[in-house]
Image (cartoon, grey):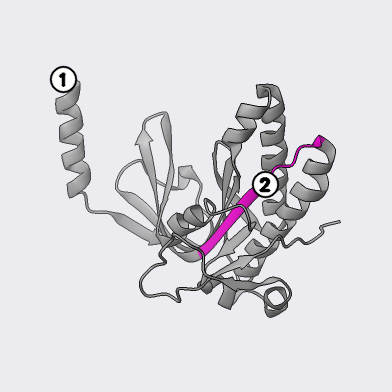
Amino acid sequence: MGLFSDLSIQVDAFLKQRWESDEARVVPDPDDLRLRNHAKKLNAVVLYADLADSTALVDAYEPQVVTRLYKSFLHCAASLIRANNGEIVAYDGDRIMAIYIGDSKNTNAVATSFKINYAVNEIINQKSHISIKHVVGIDRGDLFISRIGIRNANDLVWVGRAANYAAKLSSQSDNYQTYVTDDIYQAMARDLRERHSWLLWPKGWKPYPDANPIKVLFSNSSISFV
């Protein structure tokens, strides 16, 4: 039997599978899920932090220089995510994905974003003498988490509005550094909201049908962590 036939049979099996799912109380590790029709369900906040316009960096600088900037950005973002009770769940090139759970998950995610902005402006750009920019997208909701791939080459996939919308928001214009949905805005700490929020209409991106169409953006807001 050829590879095409093997793949065809396997896809048929995937499409007909009944999924076994259970509620998660913590962010799962890959070992918590079987590489079959098994999933965890989790209500969480998703944060994506993306280095903006990395193609321009690659075009303008030597690979070693760009790699140093990538490492600096991702190290700062990862450290601040952990320091603010987030869990790092994926790296994708110059982008990092994190999950927040618990009573303060909305505020912790937004605070992380502001601290990442502080680190980019006050540490990375000051020390590298290169002005990099980034965008963070944040949303909340139910996630359906499963393990995908093949044996010895697999990872977790995070299915749900929050993951997709946070990723989409992180690809918006780098004129602003933090984009959040209205759900995050309403749930975050009031003092953080009142000191930093702008209500705008981002162009070119239609929100989900049942939500407030106004997206909340934070214009270059920072919180020092020192």
The local crowd at label 2, few if under 14, some if 14 to 19, many if 20 or more residues have their Cα within 10 Å, is some
The picture places residue 179, in percent across and down from the top left corner, at 58, 62
Q: Element type at marker 2? A: loop
- Marking on residue 133: 2
Residue that appears at 51% across and 57% down? 169
Discs 1/2, front: 2
Q: In the rendered image of this protein, does residue 72 appear above or below residue 134?
A: above
Report the magenta residues as a range.
128-139
Q: Is residue 129 magenta?
A: yes
Residue that appears at 68% across and 22% down? 62
The picture places residue 220, in percent across and down from the top left corner, at 71, 60
Q: Is residue 38 visible?
A: yes
Q: Is residue 163 magenta?
A: no
The picture places residue 39, in percent across and down from the top left corner, at 37, 53
Q: Report the residue marked by disc 1.
A: 2
Q: Quadrant of residue 104?
A: bottom right
